[in-house]
Image: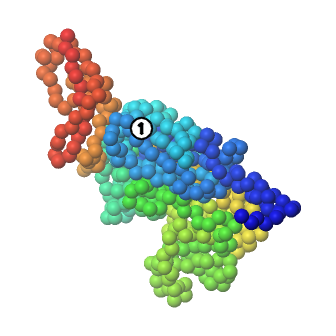
């Protein structure tokens, strides 16, 4: 074979340089890092998750994607032939991956295998020992402090401390009379009582459909941990309600949004809450899916500020007008007219809806209030564009922990400095990039599902401590039923039954479906020995698995 001469070794040196440059882009199975709440059996979430950080053989973290199919993840239970678990490996395009999985049944001793070219990664297989409950399993941890430890909840949340500090005590009997009188006719309210970890509710007002979001988080939380008995009112509307001054008598109203001029107790928004509960369910936009859909790399993004939305605020009209005057800096348009239909000729035409994930084709994302705070803020932060956030009197539960110029670029409420801020970001590209990454990291650390559950629990726990009267199931309250889980029911080892034999069996992990006569129990000594046999029986057209035990009588 004829080969060209390479007297100066140019091709050889070029090949060596290429090899040196690309050597660090190959992940090492031994060096790669794996961590996260989805590797712990006691952390029950609708969609569990953990992280993989690709690391090369020299110990350096990869900062670009090694390929979305780099890692293979399998989750199995040795006790089961099949596991009903949906797994997704999401490439975050920064050298790391988010692995999420949703369980549709409860299993024992889950084994999580993480493979790189058929080699186990880090300490794979990771074994979740004992019973691993799925989201639908009603098996609350009876000790709240233990649950907090399992969940790694922070000791406090600044917004909760601020909101609850306004109340020395909470008189539930007084509130049950006064709050409906003040707000029940003109507003949409829910009056909730949690008693013995059961949820009861009474609604006030005409438009109470949003109650489904509050019902859902309360039912999900009470399946995971025993809540203290408590009684409270939830505002189902957009605007916070309690406008009295701190020096006046104020009523505790739980709302999804707060403002500088009101005194409501702020919860995570219904939008963020639902996205947590329905991750890998009926929602497509959630805090995990965003991380895998951040658009092109920073250098390849369009250096234009971007916004889409509806006409729910005057400043949004001004934003669209500004975009028309400066299309080279700003792309802002309405996708729907509702509040200012008479101005459609001035601020139209309407444009087609854009996938939220396509927002991240642009470097600069504008977050501007709608009727209240724009509930898209968590998802904008989770992307890798920099957020330009309008100064606002409205806030979500986490705004007090955000820092301007660290997590986002601030803009005036009247948008008077917006063009100046866009120009600054263009002229300071590296600094803008750092702000984008800091905002992204904030979202990953503070706005994922485990953090949202912790926030709700800490809020309810803190509020319950202020109560000076007994929470009651009031007149006309109805029980909010846990959803049926007939197809793949779980048997909670924490729910002990009164029958002595059943107590013994439950302590060994058995749900015993019949009772023996007390006289019979008094005459025998019972030893329970678990055998590795699983049987099944049909009940109401469902297949229910039960542990079969052998009994040895003395």
Q: Is residue 335 above or below residue 534?
A: below
Asked which quadrant contains residue 318, the reply is bottom right
Q: Residue at x 21, y 16 (%)?
A: 552
How packed mark 1 is, by other alpha carbons closer than 10 Å (few <14, some 14-19, many 20 or more), is many
Q: Nearer the viewer, residue 387 or 285?
A: 285
Q: Is residue 299 above or below residue 533?
A: below
Q: Nearer the viewer, residue 236 or 386?
A: 386
Q: Residue at x 67, y 69 (%)?
A: 300
Query: Looking at this rendering, what residue extends furthest in the bottom direction?
Result: 345
Q: Residue at x 75, y 53 (%)?
A: 20
State the image coordinates of residue 429 (x, y, percent, origin top left): 74, 65
State the image coordinates of residue 66 (x, y, percent, origin top left): 61, 55
Residue at mark 1: 110
**How is the protein colored in the picture?**
rainbow
Query: Looking at this rendering, what residue extends furthest in the front direction?
Result: 1
Asked which quadrant contains residue 366, the reply is bottom right
Left or right of 494? Residue 315 is right
Q: Residue at x 58, y 39 (%)?
A: 122
* Residue 417 seen in the figure: no
* Residue 209 seen in the figure: yes
Badge 1 element? strand
Q: Is residue 549 above or below residue 374?
A: above
Image quadrant where one finds the C terminus: top left
Query: Looking at this rendering, what residue extends furthest in the top direction?
Result: 554
State the image coordinates of residue 531 (x, y, percent, origin top left): 27, 25
Q: Nearer the viewer, residue 192 or 261?
A: 192
State the image coordinates of residue 272 (x, y, percent, origin top left): 47, 56
Image quadrant where one finds the N terminus: bottom right
């Amino acid at each position: 074979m004829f080969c060209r001469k390479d007297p100066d070794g140019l091709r050889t040196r070029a090949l060596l340089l290429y090899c040196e440059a690309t050597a660090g882009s190959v992940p090492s199975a031994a060096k790669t890092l794996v961590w996260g709440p989805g590797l712990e059996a006691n952390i029950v979430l609708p969609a569990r998750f953990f992280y993989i950080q690709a690391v090369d053989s020299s110990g350096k973290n990869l900062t670009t994607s090694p390929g979305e199919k780099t890692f293979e993840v399998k989750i199995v239970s040795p006790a089961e032939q099949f596991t009903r678990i949906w797994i997704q490996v999401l490439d975050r395009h920064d050298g790391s991956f988010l692995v999420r999985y949703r369980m549709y049944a409860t299993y024992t001793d889950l084994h999580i295998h993480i493979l790189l070219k058929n080699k186990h990664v880090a300490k794979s297989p990771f074994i979740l020992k004992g019973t691993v409950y799925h989201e639908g399993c009603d098996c609350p941890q009876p000790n709240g402090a233990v649950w907090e430890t399992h969940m790694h909840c922070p000791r406090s949340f600044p917004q909760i401390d601020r909101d609850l500090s306004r109340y020395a005590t909470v008189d539930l009997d007084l509130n049950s009379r006064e709050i409906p009188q003040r707000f029940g006719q003109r507003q949409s309210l829910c009056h909730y009582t949690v008693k013995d970890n059961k949820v009861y509710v009474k609604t006030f007002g005409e438009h109470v459909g949003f109650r489904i979001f509050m019902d859902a988080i309360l039912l999900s939380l009470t399946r995971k941990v025993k809540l203290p008995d408590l009684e409270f009112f939830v505002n189902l509307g957009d605007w916070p309600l309690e406008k009295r001054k701190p020096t006046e008598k104020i009523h505790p109203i739980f709302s999804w949004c707060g403002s500088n001029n009101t005194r409501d107790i702020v919860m995570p928004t219904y939008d963020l809450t639902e996205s947590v509960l329905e991750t890998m369910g009926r929602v497509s936009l959630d805090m995990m899916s965003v991380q895998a859909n951040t658009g092109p790399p920073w250098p390849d993004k369009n250096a234009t500020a971007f916004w889409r939305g509806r006409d729910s605020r005057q400043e949004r009209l001004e934003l669209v007008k500004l975009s028309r005057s400066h299309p080279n800096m700003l792309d802002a348009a309405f996708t729907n007219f509702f509040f200012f239909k008479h101005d459609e000729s001035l601020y139209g035409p309407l444009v087609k809806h854009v996938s939220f994930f396509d927002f991240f084709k642009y470097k600069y994302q504008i977050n501007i209030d709608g009727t209240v705070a724009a509930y898209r803020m968590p998802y904008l932060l989770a992307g890798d564009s920099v957020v330009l956030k309008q100064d606002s009197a409205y806030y979500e539960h986490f705004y007090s922990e955000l820092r301007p110029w660290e997590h986002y670029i601030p803009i005036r409420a009247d948008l008077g400095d917006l063009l100046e801020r866009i120009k600054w970001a263009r002229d300071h590209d590296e600094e803008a990039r750092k702000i984008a990454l800091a905002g992204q990291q904030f979202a990953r650390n503070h706005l994922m599902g485990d953090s949202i559950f912790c926030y709700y629990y800490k809020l309810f726990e803190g509020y319950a401590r202020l109560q000076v009267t007994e929470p009651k199931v009031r007149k006309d309250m109805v029980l909010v039923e846990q959803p049926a889980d007939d197809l793949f029911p779980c048997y909670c080892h924490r729910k002990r039954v009164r029958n002595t034999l059943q107590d013994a069996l439950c302590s060994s992990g058995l749900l015993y479906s019949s009772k023996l006569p007390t006289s019979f129990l008094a005459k025998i000594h019972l030893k329970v020995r678990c055998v590795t046999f699983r049987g099944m029986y049909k009940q109401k057209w469902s297949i229910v698995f039960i542990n079969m035990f052998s009994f040895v009588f003395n």
